[in-house]
Amino acid sequence: MNYILGLSALSDRLSNFNWGGLLVTIGIGALQIIAIWIAFIIVKGAANKVVERVFDKYRMRNDVSEGRAQTLQSLSKNIIGYILIFVFFVTILQIFGIQVTAILAGAGIVGLAVGFGAQGLVSDVVTGFFILLEKQVDVGDYVSTGNFSGIVEEVGLRTTHIRGFDGTLHYVPNREITSVSNHSRGNMRALVDIGISYDDDIDKAMVVLQQVCDTIAQEDDNIVDGPNVLGVQTLGASDVVLRVLCKTKNMEQWGVERKLRKALKEALDQNGIEIPYPHQVYIEKKES
């Protein structure tokens, strides 16, 4: 009997409930969220444009290097994005009647962060701050850290983006960057080892190679010092290995090495100096 009375009371409440008012409230809330989202997109785009213009002026005045300007520009966009996302969610919560200020006042910002397990986030931000403060890396630098190596595309508050040479984009949390090797600070080394036959004249080969090196040094602006033929590096099983060494502008060492290998090989061929290579001899036994 009580069960029937309860169902009857529930039915009366549902029939008397203002469904139209609920739908209107939901519709207004949805429109407010959409409007806030559109405003978020517009403000973020406008802020990014302002940041780009500011750093373009810095570049034109040569106040900062290109890599440093790109680093600070990407970081500024990153910070603005986080701030706008925070404002967006706070506004959404207020639409639903949730007082964010009361939550923060009751729990405390630090306590709230720890409660959500954000110790890693704090560590990322602090480490990222010191990476930028000490100018360890800039956008465009060739770096190695941990198991990753490549070109820095972005330095953010939480992560550093490194593009590997195979095209893979690595998102490395800043707290995992315990040590970093920056290959873009200063000149780089280009090294070429080339072998000649034991029957050839070593001194003649060195003279030929040095002539080629001198010619390339005059032609290639990426070479800072050298190239120079250092001499015999190793005595191999079938060749005498000569080493050529020079210094280049950073990130140009691989191109210079390729150019040297081609020119040195062609010069040795023109002067009749053999570059040994493995031979395979097949012996076929015929039955008598």
Image (cartoon, rainbow, N blue to C red):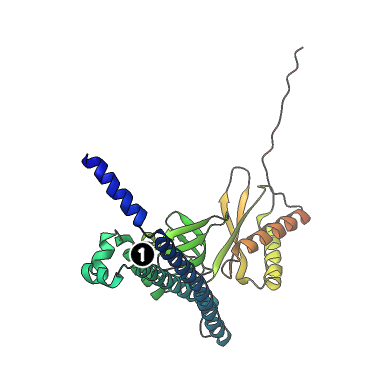
Closest to the observer, 37 or 55: 37
Closest to the observer, 192 or 62: 62
Residue 2: % across, % down: 21, 42
At a point 23% along the width and 72% down the height, the residue shown is 105
Closest to the observer, 154 or 217: 154
Mark 1 burial class by Cα count in 10 Å: few <14, some 14-19, many 20+ = many
Task: Report whether residue 60 is seen.
Answer: yes
At a point 35% along the width and 57% down the height, the residue shown is 17
If the image is split into quadrants, where does the N terminus sit? top left
In the figure, residue 283 lies in which quadrant?
Answer: top right
The reply, left or right, for residue 68 in relation to residue 121 is: right
Mark count: 1
At a point 61% along the width and 61% down the height, the residue shown is 254
Residue 227: % across, % down: 62, 67
The reply, left or right, for residue 252 in relation to residue 283 is: left
Closest to the observer, 97 or 266: 97
- Compared with 5, 64 (above or below) is below
Residue 207: % across, % down: 69, 62
